[in-house]
Amino acid sequence: MPAQITTAAVQEVVAPPTTAATAEAYFLFIQGRTLEGRGDVAGAIAAYRQAIELVPAAADVRAELAGLYAREGRAAESIAEAEAALKSDPENREAHRILGFVRSALADNAPPGAQQAALVAQAITHFEKALAGGTRDLGVELSLGRLYVRTGQHPKAIETLQGFLNDQPGYPEGVLMLVEALNATGQFAEAIAVLEPLVRDEPDLARARTWLAELYDRAGRESDAIPHWAELARTNPSNVMIRSRYATALVNAGEIEEGRRELLTLTTDSPRDISAWYLLSQVENRAGHPEAADAAARKISEIDPDDPRGPLALAESHAARGDYRGAVATLEPLLAALRDLPAGGAYLRAAIDLANALEQSGEMNRAVRVLEDGHSRVPGDLGLTHALAAAYARDTQLDNAERLYRELLAQNAGDRDALNGLGYLLADQKKDLDEAVELVQRALAGDPDNPSYLDSLGWAYVQQGKADEGRAVLERAAAAVPTDSLVLHHLASSLFQLKRYREAQAAWDRALAGDQNGIDVEEVTRMRDRAKELAGRS
């Protein structure tokens, strides 16, 4: 709706209130609005033009004419009139409003590049000025929120769209944009809370249901995601991606056989869809069917020998049964071939998987070199940077690990894995323990039940000498991952500090019977035996 204008506003801008020109200009302004309402655009323009001739500095009249031109799709004339209005009144809200809408529309139709970016930036500036001082305008708020999301200004988008939705609760476009901004800032629980009512009220809105299912997956709530993926798969039976996501949710929720059956049906329905075969190979590994996993991987290479997902799946199958040398032999030629191509997802996955296979084969130096090479080729990839930082830590290149974690946090202070990685690194060295606790607590604030984060916090407390606080946290972590030897070792250490030697001995026994990842078996055995000796004395 065009902004309202009062007689006083025209008088104040145009001329002293007693002049005949002011009165006639106001009459022409009202006449212009009336004519436009009747569909007589040409007559309305003529009336506004006459008013402007009488009072050339009438910013509100020019802004009204700019709005008419905008509604008629005459962008250049709209911009000219709005900019003329701003020359008379730089704070004119209606002129800023119109320029925001026109330049936003021009940006939507412009090809990507510098011109489009400039139009978006100009539109944002005009919309912000239209809302200056707490002015409310729902149309501007929605459009500004969209531009904030588009330009990655997510905190501003969240604030603006939340204000809009306070007045227009449940408005689908506003909800979906707010969810996008919340998702981008890792606020999955908040995004879910915003989206659930919309899906409940608009169950046929597929985009909203898909978003909600994806958010449940990201928040680790696969059981909640399943019914939504199931409904989407039922209503979109030819959509391989949706059916694959449904199968993935089933597997991640522990319903491995159900997910496997869904994928077998999918590969029957779409026998040449490589993504379905790739996922099936992974699920067969999870189900403990290595031969079937190999067969699915080889099926990919039969369909397309050049598709990297074939050797990637085959290498994963080797690794799943402990054949890390076989995984290395499969991945080395693949990575060499991918290095000659533009770096993409397949290259990054091959580099990380090869590094893991080399490390598991006892070739830590080569594993680090693979990741360093990948990082030099794609320095901005977060997954590769995280993998290299963690590898540096395991290779006792602690300064390099700390440097990378701090670089990650400089880019994104809310990166939970970087917060946890750096916090654990400091705790394990008994270095800057207060900072270590604070870092891990920040990670836990966004994911309070993450066993890895709980382990880091508990271990930091133990290193501080706060064994009882550490024990309480570590017991939660151990309950979530009962075969994780490193978590159990940390729990045993807290119990040993508390002189609860029998319990410490039992925890170290469980650590030795666990996966043995991350522990020195000889050292843990020695500590277990010491706890047993002390328990006997008591």
Image (tube, rainbow, N blue to C red):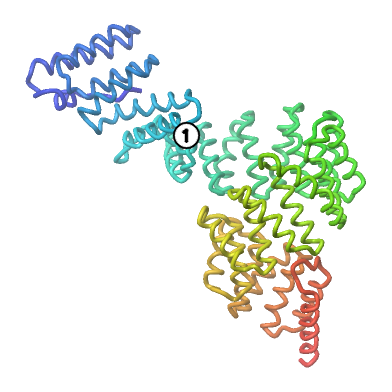
For image coordinates 29% across by 27% down, the residue present is 95
Residue 413: x, y in percent?
A: 51, 56
The quarter of the picture where residue 399 lies is bottom right
Number of marks in the image? 1
> Which residue occupies the foreground of this view, 168 or 104?
104
Furthest residue to the bottom?
Answer: 537
Look at label 1 and name its amino acid: Arg
> Which residue occupies the foreground of this view, 128 or 188?
128
For image coordinates 84% across by 46% down, the residue present is 314
The N terminus lies in quadrant: top left
- Residue tagged by mark 1? 146
Q: Is residue 14 left or right of residue 213?
A: left
Residue 155: x, y in percent?
A: 46, 46
Residue 245: x, y in percent?
A: 73, 38
Q: Is residue 501 left or right of residue 111?
A: right
For image coordinates 18% across by 17% down, the residue present is 26
**Which secondary structure lies at badge 1?**
helix
Residue 402: x, y in percent?
A: 58, 65
Using the image, determine if residue 479 lies above or below residue 123: below
The C terminus lies in quadrant: bottom right
The quarter of the picture where residue 301 lies is top right
Q: Please rate how many residues cluster around mark 1, counting C-alpha atoms within 10 Å: few if below 14, some from 14 to 19, many from 20.
A: many
> Which residue occupies the foreground of this view, 372 or 86?
372
Answer whether residue 325 is visible to the viewer in this image: yes
Furthest residue to the right?
Answer: 291
Furthest residue to the front?
Answer: 340
Answer whether residue 266 is visible to the viewer in this image: no
Using the image, determine if residue 370 lies above or below residue 125: below
> Which residue occupies the foreground of this view, 528 or 175?
528
Using the image, determine if residue 44 lies above or below residue 250: above
